[in-house]
Amino acid sequence: MAHARISANLPPNIDPTKAPIAFGRRALPKLNEELQSPELLTQQRALMALCDLVHDPQNVYQALELGILDNLKTLLVHQDSTVRQKTTEILHIMTMHNVGRHGLIQNGMISALAELLNDPVDTCRKNTHLVFEYMSKLTEGAVGILHAGLIPLLVSKLKNELEEIQELILGTLSNCLRVEASEALAADAVIVLKEKLTHSSVATRSKRNLPITHDTHPEGKNEVCEEVIPVLVSLLEDADPEVQASATGALMFATLKPQGRFSALDAGAIPPLLKLAAEEGGKARLSAIKALTILAELPKGRETLLNHLDTFQQCLKDPSKAVKRAAKTAISVIQWKPY
């Protein structure tokens, strides 16, 4: 005769590390209450459950309406590292949604997160920088980071932070410095970014780590031209195509300024740019043609490029309409005569 046996194991669909989730719209209010519990385990389990729910933008919207961010702000400075890790992870997931980014910015989360930039736990710092990078993609987020005075601190972190976190910082700086670059210049950002251009990591070298080349701040022009453009020219011959493409794009923007054009010519930019322009299917081809077109506006540049019109003629056969159009413009500029 068979007998019933009671197992000591939990059912396979039960996770003891997560709080039981209430049904429907009661789920988030219940978790919000548990976040305020004096019991550490209850808080940890609520955070684990909340991590799953905020993947849904509708839940993010409801969480913002309930004021969950106020409780999360408090937990950011919790003495338990697990609580801080899960709290920053939740905020990171929320910023992956547009409604979440706006919500965090409007609730003053930037200043609260700044406290974690020196957190001893690597994961907490990484999540914090992920949040900053996502928020900085919005103009209001970049402005918020600037107003919080975080640019000098972020620049200083590039010197000793973990490599993967440095890449996140570079992304944040890239977005913020398109809005305003004076603070970065005051913090010697050009010198630090110049060092990153020669970093051993391909990901770091190819990162958008020279947003300052887009800036027209009068104090930054000389520094960028003198310090950065020669390094960019050397990167045009880097072994990695991503690095070449990134350097070509940055150089193209830098040469939009008259002083940048002269610096690029003096640094010997034309030969490597011609090589990239001649490379069929190359990632840097379009930017290289545009950069050469800009350099052709200088008499010395035009004189040099008149001997290489065949390179641009070959570009007219490229399947890309953008490349064809750029090559046609380049030929027109190179062959231009003042009479």
Image (spheres, helix red, strand yellow):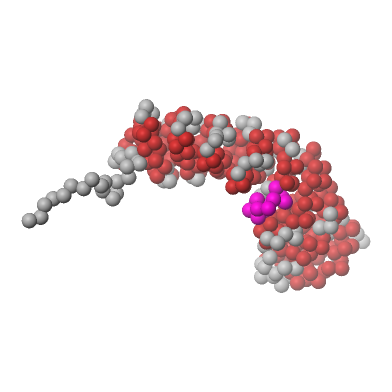
* Above/below status of 321 relative to 212: below
Residue 182: tell me if it is visible: no
Residue positioned most to the right: 339
Q: Where residue 319 sits: x, y (%)?
A: 66, 70
Q: Nearer the viewer, residue 314 or 169?
A: 169
Residue 161 sits in quarter: top right
* Above/below status of 167 relative to 74: below
Residue at the image point whose x is 47% and y is 35% from the top: 81
Residue 323: tell me if it is visible: yes
Residue 157 sits in quarter: top right
Q: Is 209 left, or right, of 231 in this rendering?
A: left
Residue at the image point whose x is 79% and y is 64% from the top: 274
Q: Where residue 202 sits: x, y (%)?
A: 65, 55
Residue 54 sits in quarter: top left
Q: Nearer the viewer, residue 63 or 171?
A: 171
Q: Is residue 242 magenta?
A: no
Q: Is residue 197 magenta?
A: yes
Q: Where residue 275 sits: x, y (%)?
A: 77, 65
Q: Nearer the viewer, residue 130 or 174?
A: 130
What range of the chain is rendered magenta? 196-207
Q: How many marks?
A: 0
Residue positioned most to the left: 1
Q: Where residue 239 sits: x, y (%)?
A: 70, 62
Residue at the image point whose x is 68% and y is 60% from the top: 240
